[in-house]
């Protein structure tokens, strides 16, 4: 039974526990909550993987947010303090998991939209290699700080980033360019495009499943 004192959360244990626990931490998007991703464990169908769904720290019109919303894209504005605050909480959560016996290499991160930004941020700055980082329909904060701000483990991390060609909230070309920048820095990053808006598609879920299964062995 994994838990955290830092976030409201829901733990979904693996259907088929292995010799050691492997968990994916799920970060929702703006205005959503952990309830928006309770479908994920059954949809992915990875029986050896546990899930820790968490609520972002700030209230936002009936849901939650990871940082102040400033209109999306690369213009962070007042969001900077919120991103840094959430970064600290996520790093604390990863430490809590290690204290409960889940090593960094057995911890995966998934994020959608704002949650994608936070997952990428954690993957680039956390000091240990994680099992993998999946980001959907999001973007990269603080690009100007990279590669100087990379942790020593950043180039050992494994990233999958997906985005919609018709995303009306976060323009495809901006995220595509950011991912190209990260790959140019030597990061192990796969970028996949889909004919979608700001959502997730069944075929996309299938691709995420296959990518995770490869890393789970």
Image: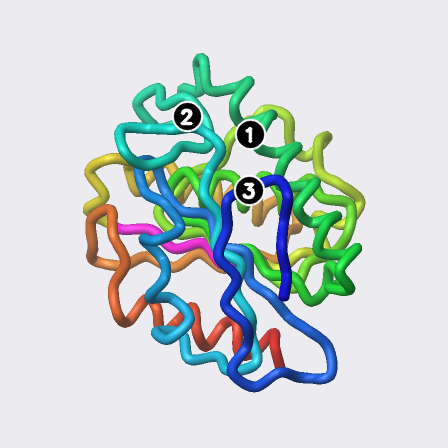
Disc 1 residue crowd, few under 14, some 14–19, many 20+, Cα 10 Å:
some
> What secondary structure is found at the residue carrying circle 3?
loop
Kindly identify which numbered label has been placed on residue 143.
1
- Would residue 61 appear left or right of 106 to someone viewing this image? left
Whichever of callouts 1 and 2 sits on the residue coming sooner in the sequence is: 2
Label 2 with label 3: CB-CB less than 8 Å: no
- The quarter of the picture where residue 209 lies is bottom left
Task: Give the number of callouts.
Answer: 3
Q: Which residues are magenta?
A: 159-164
Front position among marks 3 and 1: 3
Disc 2 residue crowd, few under 14, some 14–19, many 20+, Cα 10 Å:
some
Kindly identify which numbered label has been placed on residue 7.
3
Q: How is the image coloured?
A: rainbow
Vertical placement of residue 60 versus 186, above or below = above
Residue furthest to the top in view is: 78
Residue 8 forms part of the magenta stretch: no
Kindly identify which numbered label has been placed on residue 74.
2
Q: Position of residue 11 (x, y in %)?
A: 52, 62
Q: Position of residue 176 (x, y in %)?
A: 40, 44
Tell me the CA gap for discs 3 and 1: 27 Å
């Amino acid at each position: 039974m994994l838990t955290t004192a830092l976030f409201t959360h829901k733990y979904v244990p693996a259907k088929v526990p292995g010799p050691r626990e492997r968990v994916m931490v799920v970060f929702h998007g703006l205005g959503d909550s952990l309830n928006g991703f309770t479908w994920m464990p059954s949809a992915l169908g990875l029986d050896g993987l546990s899930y820790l769904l968490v609520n972002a720290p700030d209230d936002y019109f009936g849901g939650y947010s990871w940082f102040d919303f400033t209109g999306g894209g690369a213009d962070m504005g007042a969001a900077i303090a919120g991103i840094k605050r959430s970064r600290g909480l996520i790093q604390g959560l990863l430490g809590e998991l290690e204290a409960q016996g889940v090593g960094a290499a057995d911890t995966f991160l998934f994020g959608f939209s704002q949650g994608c930004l936070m997952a990428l941020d954690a993957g680039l700055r956390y000091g240990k290699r994680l099992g993998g980082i999946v980001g959907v329909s999001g973007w990269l904060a603080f690009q100007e700080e990279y590669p100087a701000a990379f942790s020593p483990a950043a180039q050992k991390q494994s990233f999958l980033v997906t985005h919609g060609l018709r995303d009306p909230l976060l323009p495809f070309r901006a995220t595509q360019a950011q991912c190209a920048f990260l790959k140019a820095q030597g990061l192990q990053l796969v970028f996949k495009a889909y004919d979608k808006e700001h959502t997730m598609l069944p075929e996309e879920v299938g691709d995420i499943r296959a990518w995770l299964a490869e890393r789970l062995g």
